[in-house]
Amino acid sequence: MLFGKHYPAQETLQVEGLPVICHLQRSKRKSLALHVRYEGVEIRAPLHISTSDALRFVEKHHQWLTRKLDERRKRAAECLSLQDGGQIHYKARTLRVYLENAEKPAVVIESERMIIRGPAITANKAERVLKHWLLEQAKSWLPARTRALADYLGVNHKLANVVFRKTRSKWGHCTAKGIIQYNWLIMLAPDGVIDYMICHEVCHLLHMNHSPQYWQSVSRVCPDYQRYVGWLKKHEHQLWF
Ligand SMILES: [Zn+2]
């Protein structure tokens, strides 16, 4: 039996200036604590805490909460999600993902939507459909452009093969034997970034290092390469799935 006023175990509160709902959760605990969750803020409180005391506690930590919520929103917004209604960064645009049941697997870009189709489609199946789609794009785009640039730079004879692999750490790689490897996820990046990647790898056929001479060759082919290096640094985490 509790003494004094008996408060409900759970309450939802709207706090002025906070963009989310606060869920007040009373339990047999001794102190107040705040937790930022995807669905809102959770206030964990002892059983005897009144609603107004809980509100005062939230208000006291208003700044901290706002900062936490901002961080969370930013991270969530940047995360690629192949769930229905999720988002994907494609060619520097943010598209909403729509999963659609269809007999034939396909990916269709329609205004601000990326529609991923397939039989009994789920997020997992959508991943396979999208992988296949990106790999097909990579195959039709990257080898031809790689060969053309190698030809232009007079190193076509050094280019043994162009292969594709999804690696965690790299967008491209050029081996000493002249095999250029691309991560097909790069097809999600803007065309300028893709061209820079091609330039980066093909210039390794001239210089097998990142020496000043190597970067000179890169800048002759791709004068604003630093912009693309910067873009990758800032955005590459958005392209992974
Ligand atoms: Zn390199």
Image: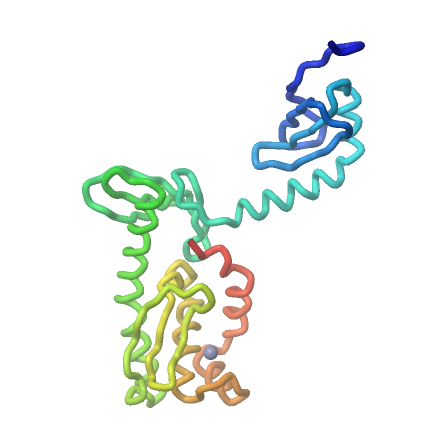
- Provide residue 226's location: percent of width, then percent of height: 54, 73
Quadrant in which residue 115 is drawn: top left
At x 28%, y 56%, the residue is 132
Which residue is drawn at the image coordinates 40% and 63% (left, top)?
A: 186
Specify the color scheme: rainbow
Q: How many dots with numbers?
A: 0
Q: Could you say where residue 146 lies in the image, as x and y percent from the top left?
A: 32, 77
Which residue is at 47% across, 81% downward?
A: 218
Judging depth in this view, the residue of 233 and 119 nearest the camera is 119
The residue at the far front in this view is 1
Q: Quadrant of the image for the N terminus? A: top right
Q: Position of residue 129 (x, y in %)?
A: 29, 50
- In the image, what residue occupies the spot 75% across and 35% down? 62
Would residue 70 appear left or right of 124 to someone viewing this image? right
Q: Which residue extends farthest left?
A: 103
Quarter location, residue 14:
top right
Q: Is residue 180 above or below residue 137?
A: below
Q: x and y percent of residue 15 in the render?
A: 70, 26
User: Which residue is at the front of the view, 142 or 175?
Assistant: 175
146 in relation to 139, above or below = below
Q: Is residue 94 left or right of residue 102?
A: right
Q: Is residue 14 left or right of residue 201?
A: right
Frontmost residue, 146 versus 86:
86
Q: In which quadrant of the rendered view does residue 59 lie? A: top right
